Amino acid sequence: IPVAHLSIHDHYFAEGDTVTINGNGTDIDGDIVAYRWTSSIDGTVGTQRNLSTTSLTYGNHTISFKVKDDVGEWSLYNVTWVYVDDYPVVTIDGVTPNPAAYGANVTFNGTASDNMGHITAYQWTSDRDGVISTSSDFVIANLSLGNHTITFKAKDNASLWSQPVTLVVNATYKPTAE
């Protein structure tokens, strides 16, 4: 009966990272002709000697590896684990009013979620004014005059930042009566 072997490997990854685990097999009376890698979450994730994948979904995976010899016998599984953290996801729920009169209060509302942890930081930036808030919701009255590309992002407890989302806010000139 063949025997499956695993190398020492990293256990913690972020979604989209390359997960690499080296495998090997031995058979005292023959050759290894096939390999199978299985995730407890994603099913079969590889059929080569070494696992290298960027497609593991987030979660705590039990990774099982087995080898097949040249007479068709499969080894017992050799088992390890990897933890794949997800990135937070953000949404700009509203910016009112938009456009806004120069100097007027503008209310920003955003939400963030993280399936594997919790949100620890928020950041709103303007391409004209820099960082304008570190809260999910806020009111600001001092946007500089002109069009602003506003970017919102959030960080989770694993220090992973979301993909930023953007929108344009226009702070227009408000003429004064003479």
Image (spheres, grey):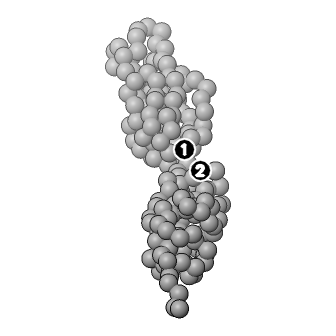
Residue occupying image coordinates x 55% and y 24%: 6
**Mark 1 secondary-structure assignment:** strand
x and y percentages locating residue 58 in the rendered image: 50, 49
Please name whichever residue, 172 or 13, is drawn nearer the observer in this view of the structure: 172
In the image, is residue 80 above or below residue 30?
A: below
Where 125 sits versus 103, above or below? Answer: above
| Type of the residue with mark 1 | Ala
Does residue 122 appear in this view?
no
Q: Given contact means CB atoms under 8 Å apart, are the residues at marks 1 and 2 in contact? A: yes
Residue 14 is labelled as 1
Mark closest to the chain's N terminus, 1 or 2: 1
Q: CA distance from mark 1 to mark 2?
A: 8 Å
Q: Amino acid at mark 2?
A: Leu
Residue 115, image x, y percentages = 53, 58
Give neighbour class at mark 1: few <14, some 14-19, many 20+ (Cα, 10 Å): some
Task: Decide: is 144 above or below 4.
Answer: below
Q: Is residue 129 left or right of residue 51?
A: right
Residue 14: x and y, percent? 54, 44
Q: Residue at x 44, y 34 (%)?
A: 53
Residue 109 rendering spot, x and y as whole percentages: 53, 74
Q: Is residue 142 visible?
A: yes
Residue 160 badge: 2
Name the residue: 56% across, 55% down: 116
In front here: 102 or 97? 102
